[in-house]
Image: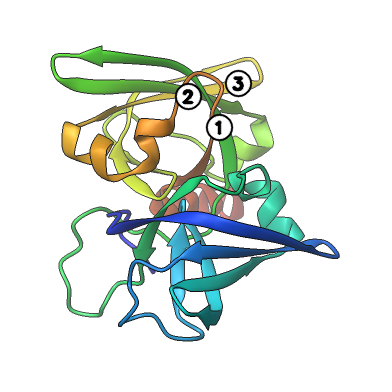
Amino acid sequence: MFSGIVDAMAQVIKIDQDQSNKHFTLRNPYPEQMGIDQSIAHNGVCLTVVRNEGDNYIVTAMQETLNRSNLGVIKEGDWVNLERAMVLGDRLDGHIVQGHVDQTARCIEVKETDGCCSYRFEYDHTPDMLERGYFCVDKGSVCINGVSLTVCDPDVKADKGFVSVCIIPYTYENTNFKDIQVGTIVNLEFDIIGKYFARMKQLYK
């Protein structure tokens, strides 16, 4: 379980293909704290640490994860946002994030407004996805690349959904949002509470 509050970034050092899986070697920003079997969110994707190698650590993503997230398209040298699992009793500074990415989105606009950066994203949308709770509501929460953000101007048109978010300078400097430009693919995790309500509506209609 996570909160969408990024606490570090890590650079991808090496990517190895193993049948349909990919093994990612990353520089370890928590050298004294990361153990085998620990769950870490990478761009919002919960992955298990399988090995430590000096200053680096290794995680593995299966095909389903690669298909649903941008881990399938990141390259060696890219930076990913990291968040360690929540500790029971800590403050929930963001919102409830599972680390189970629902789908990807594409950045279609980046602009600076009054000292902050605004981003607009589009994502594939179908009636079936709406029934499963894959949508955004104004002033609700969404997790983008592992960052808990407030939704602005959500919209749905034909087969596309749209969502905008604003980033304060601190978030810009301390996450990989500074690398996002028009065309960049990001990970989306929709609000779990909305997904539960959508499911209940289907079960009891």
Q: Is residue 139 above or below residue 148?
A: above
Label 1: element kind: strand
Classify residue 176 as left or right of residue 78: left
Q: CA distance from mark 1 to mark 3?
A: 10 Å
Classify residue 98 as left or right of residue 3: right
Task: Name which of mark 1 and mark 3 comes first in the sequence.
Answer: 1
Q: Amino acid at mark 3?
A: Lys
Taking the spot 66% from the left edge, 57% from the top edge, the residue there is: 65
Q: Which residue is mark 3?
A: 160
Q: Are marks 3 and 2 in contact (CB under 8 Å)?
A: no
Task: Name which of mark 3 and mark 2 comes first in the sequence.
Answer: 2
Q: Residue furthest front?
A: 54
Q: Amino acid at mark 2?
A: Phe
Label 3: element kind: strand
Q: Which mark is residue 46?
A: none
Q: Are marks 1 and 2 in contact (CB under 8 Å)?
A: yes
Taking the spot 60% from the left edge, 21% from the top edge, the residue there is: 160
Q: Which residue is mark 2?
A: 121
Q: Amino acid at mark 1?
A: Ala
User: Which quadrant would the N terminus be assigned to in this image?
Assistant: bottom left
Q: How many marks?
A: 3
Q: Is residue 40 above or below residue 153?
A: below
Q: CA distance from mark 1 to mark 2?
A: 6 Å
Taking the spot 48% from the left edge, 71% from the top edge, the residue there is: 56
How packed is label 3: few (under 14 Cα within 10 Å), some, or many (20 or more)?
few
Q: Residue furthest right?
A: 19
Q: Which residue is mark 1?
A: 105
Classify residue 70 as left or right of residue 31: right
Task: Name which of mark 1 and mark 2 comes first in the sequence.
Answer: 1
How packed is label 2: few (under 14 Cα within 10 Å), some, or many (20 or more)?
many
Give the percent coordinates (x, y) of residue 190: 46, 45
